[in-house]
Amino acid sequence: MKRFATIGLAVALAAMWTPARAHDHHHGHESYSAGEPGDPAKPSRTIEIEMSEMNYEPFEIEVNLGEQIRFVLHNAGTEDHEFLLATTKDNLNHAAMMKKHPHMAHDEPNGARVAPRKTAEIVWKFTKPGTFEYSCLIPDHREYGMTGHVTVK
Ligand SMILES: [Cu+2]
């Protein structure tokens, strides 16, 4: 499990290098690394994402800068899964927090936690160019492959 060890090290280093940030971390912050919460009253393109153990389908998407996406998140698996949109750096910091507080609940506009056989939706506006990701931060899920990538053109 070389990949697991490497990612585990990256998480540990991220936690060590940003103690102030980790300390300040709280849910409900106003700025998000992958864009901003969308407006459900405005037009959006729908992208359906299926989650299961331990992956996303699709695991790679492309959106246009300024585009609003309605993500319909189906959990086709047998465990809870999350979909959290952020930069890799932010998700790794967040994952380190989750290891310390595994029962942390998420109620954030940039993501959702979905129970088996349930569906959730989030509306997101991609206001920043670059590469972002969606990931499941339930301990060990990310390490076993639950990461997808978003390219904003
Ligand atoms: Cu998961």
Image (spheres, grey):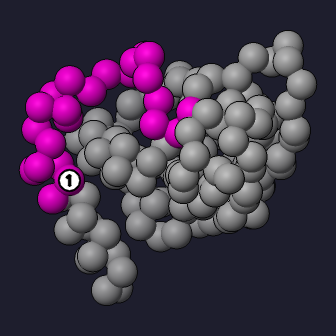
Badge 1: few (under 14), some or many (20 or more) residues near its Cα, within 10 Å?
Answer: some
20 is higher (above) or lower (below) than 30 = below
* Amino acid on which disc 1 is placed: Ala
Relative to 109, 97 lies left or right: left
Q: Kindly indicate the quadrant of the structure image that contains residue 100.
A: top left
The residue most toward the bottom is 2
Kindly indicate the quadrant of the structure image that contains residue 78.
Answer: bottom right
Tag 1 residue = 14
The answer to whether residue 101 is above or below residue 117 is above
Q: Is mark 1 within 8 Å of ligand 1?
A: no
Residue at position x 76%, y 36% from top? 67
Nearest the eye: 37 or 151: 151
Q: How many marks?
A: 1
Residue range in magenta is 13-35
On the image, the x and y values in percent for residue 23 come to 16, 28
Q: Relative to residue 99, is residue 140 drawn left or right?
A: right
**Image position, residue 92 (x, y; %):** 34, 51
Q: Is residue 35 visible?
A: yes
Question: Which quadrant: the N terminus?
Answer: bottom left
Q: Is residue 51 above or below residue 111?
A: below
* Element on which disc 1 rests: helix
26 drawn magenta: yes
Image location of residue 9, percent across then percent down: 20, 68
Is the residue 4 above or below the residue 37 in the image? below
User: In the image, is residue 16 part of the stretch drawn in magenta?
Assistant: yes
Residue at image x 31%, y 86%?
2
Left or right for 91, reference 35: left
Image point (44%, 23%), residue name: 31
Q: Nearer the viewer, residue 89 or 2?
A: 89
Residue at x-position 40% and y-position 60% = 140
